[in-house]
Image: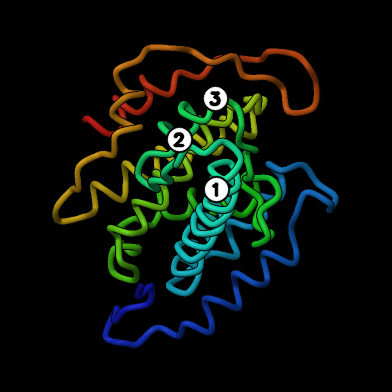
Amino acid sequence: MRWFRLGSGRQKDPAAGQAIVDDVRERFGAHLPGSFHEQAEAVVPLLAGDEGVAAAAAILREFADSAYADLQTQTAELSRRTGYAFAVDRADYRSLWRDTQGQLRWPLFTLPCRLHPYIQVSAAAGVISAEAKRATRLTAPGPLLAHILEILDLTIDGWEFARVRPDTDAAALAHRLIGAARDLRGAMSDEPPLPRPVRELMRRNHTVDIYDAASPQVVGGFNPGREMREALLA
């Protein structure tokens, strides 16, 4: 898959973009001081310019690919144990979580790529949202959009099927992913059809309690279906 293409008459340097990805991977993380929100905000200015936008796309690609590989491994082991052949469809993780009935581990906090969903991934989604037109020039926007929607699917699946607490950091990630999908689709010459999980959630009107990131207090609500309808059907 080609992530760096001609733009503004110059060949973009893949090594420069990868250096940015490696830098934010090493400098930020759950084991380091600072809240997830503070760290995500600190990542955003490091993803500036053409190389930064390309790096943001690479972060989303690497994270989505790592999640897919983890779920393939989990599903293969589950199929061996149960004798039932579970299929992993990157365009429809929601069906997999429903079919496996709580037998999968939600992997997004512990992926070997060492990118955190609420830090580097949240920052990357925000940058793609703000720089959608630039992203369509520098990256393959179709695969990038697919990665954004894969991560959104897995984020909401965690709340619904894997007992992941939907706190303010999780809601911020979901909000940024929806915004990135909206803005990237709007910048594409031909908007691709929405995948099945998004269409299924858009038919719902369920509000999820959102907890404070540092306490057990409910501080608000988030309605994924309504937000997706307003963003992706406008």
- For label 1, count other residues whose C-alpha is less than 10 Å away and answer few (under 14), some (14-19) or many (20+): many
Residue nearest the viewer, comparing 20 with 66? 66
Instruction: Identify the residue position indicated by label 3 in the image.
Output: 101
Instruction: Identify the residue position indicated by label 1 in the image.
Output: 71
Residue beneath the point at 65% across and 57% down: 115
For the residue marked with disc 1, what is the amino acid? Answer: Leu
Give the percent coordinates (x, y) of residue 64. Answer: 49, 54
Secondary structure, mark 2, is helix
For the residue marked with disc 2, what is the amino acid? Answer: Leu
Secondary structure, mark 1, is helix
The quarter of the displayed image where residue 220 is located: top right
Instruction: Identify the residue position indicated by label 2 in the image.
Output: 96
Residue nearest the viewer, comparing 232 with 106? 106
Sequence-first tag of 1 and 2? 1
How far apart are labels 1 and 2 at the CA level? 10 Å
Give the percent coordinates (x, y) of residue 47. Answer: 54, 64
The quadrant the C terminus occupies is top left
For the residue marked with disc 3, what is the amino acid? Answer: Gln
Secondary structure, mark 3, is loop
Residue beneath the point at 55% across and 48% down: 71
